[in-house]
Image (cartoon, grey):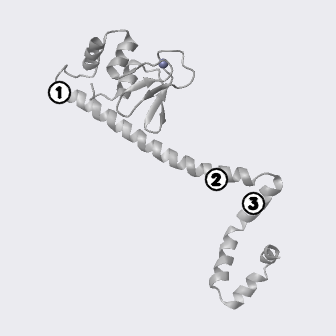
Amino acid sequence: MKEIPIEAVLTRYLPAMEFKRSGSRLVAKCPFHGDKTPSFTIFPDGGFKCFGCGAGGDSVTLVARALGIRPVEAARQIAADFGLPVGGRPGPEARRRVREAKEQREAKQMLDALCNHAYQRLCLVARSLEKSLTSYEAYENLAFWVHRQEQLEIYLDILSDGDEKKKVHVLNESLVKKLCS
Ligand SMILES: [Zn+2]
């Protein structure tokens, strides 16, 4: 049954379960006990474990438990539903499904990684805004500099590389005077 990703098995037999990624694992509320926090964990090797009620195993155990049948029947059921010949090599249909599940998983992982990255970047901005915008005065101060950002860059260029006349001119700008006083 290793050919069938456990997510594909879950989607088919326990479609109501909602998963969240937690590092390399997937977590969900356990379907086998009244779970308030997501205790049900799926590991990268396809095994699962509930840290609430202790249920655990692989996709066969899971389907057996979910459908209330014996593991050998569950294995047959999965094989039939996913087009796997029992004890044999997977047929073209099964291989296609497995490939699709793998592609979906990889696409999702890539999206997760992009989202994580964007989340961290936005988080930094949001947190620093939160820290600096403690009053209306702080807001106005920030807006003041935002509007002068381009000007600031020009001044910085001149102060480091400009000719003396320009440097003096910059030093006499009221904005610079105010800052340096
Ligand atoms: Zn449980």
Q: What residue do we see at 61% from left, 48% from top?
A: 123
Q: Sequence-wise, which precedes: disc 2 or disc 1?
A: 1
Q: Sequence-wise, which precedes: disc 1 or disc 3?
A: 1
- Compared to 145, does 93 lie above or below? above
Q: Which residue is mark 2?
A: 125
Query: Label 1 is placed on what type of residue?
Result: Arg
The percent position of residue 76, horizontal first and vertical second, equals: 25, 15
The percent position of residue 68, horizontal first and vertical second, equals: 37, 9
The percent position of residue 147, horizontal first and vertical second, equals: 72, 65
**10 Å neighbourhood of mark 2: few (<14), some, or many (≥20)?**
few
Q: Judge left or right: residue 75 versus residue 109.
A: left
Mark 1 vs mark 3, foreground winner is 1
Q: Which residue is mark 1?
A: 89
Q: What residue do we see at 35% from left, 29% from top?
A: 46
Q: Which mark is residue 143?
A: 3
Q: Sequence-wise, which precedes: disc 2 or disc 3?
A: 2
